[in-house]
Image (cartoon, rainbow, N blue to C red):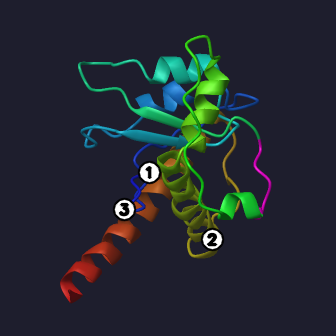
Amino acid sequence: MEIGSRLIVSEAVTDAPNDKEQLVPTLGATSPVVESISAVLIDSGFYSAAAVAAAEQSHDGKPAPTIYAATARQAHGRTIAQLEARADPPAPGADASARQIMEHRLATRAGRTLYAQRKQTIEPVFGILKAALGFRRFSLRGLTKVRTEWTLVTLAYNLKRLFHLGADLAAA
């Protein structure tokens, strides 16, 4: 998804039991219209050290994106410590694990600010798909049919979104 427009730029369906191995295939399914991806915001379900390492490798001569991933479930609400201004933590040492590096990346002011955009971009899209488009479950069965149905749903969403973006531009 592109943050500013809230357009869906990669749609993929899998029958895998979890998303740990889906980061690279999902990035690979990104529309060819998207020229470059600078940052990818993922939840803890997509996080694995191997997936992040593979996703941050340069492919096809394009610069690799920086992955920002929650390494564990985050509690809802904010604590006083999260609300207080605080300096960035010191960088992890050379012997730091991939998880420690990712935790540091998200603990920096830039990382916190960027990752906070995730809930403002993807969650409204799911709400629109459910409420405005009435898509609450798949009607078809079988992976091929479900993939086709999901492609149609995301296409309908993107067309609706592009219409509204065009209307906003015409009014300006």
- Counting from the top left corner in percent of width and height, residue 91 is at 54, 29
Estimate the spatial distance between the alpha carbons at disc 2 and disc 3, rounded to whole Å.
Answer: 24 Å
Q: Is residue 83 left or right of residue 166?
A: right
Residue pictured at 47% horizontal, 48% vertical: 110
Q: Quadrant of the C terminus?
A: bottom left
User: Between 52 and 93, which is closer to the camera in this rendering?
Assistant: 93
Look at label 3 and name its amino acid: Gly
User: Between 146 and 124, which is closer to the camera in this rendering?
Assistant: 124
Say which residue label 1 marks. Answer: 1
Tag 3 or tag 2, which sits nearer the N-term? 3
Look at label 1 and name its amino acid: Met
Q: Which mark is residue 4?
A: 3
Residue pictured at 70% horizontal, 37% vertical: 45
Residue 46 location, quadrant: top right
Tag 2 or tag 1, which sits nearer the N-term? 1
Q: Is residue 78 visible?
A: no
Residue pictured at 59% horizontal, 24% vertical: 92
Look at label 2 and name its amino acid: Gly
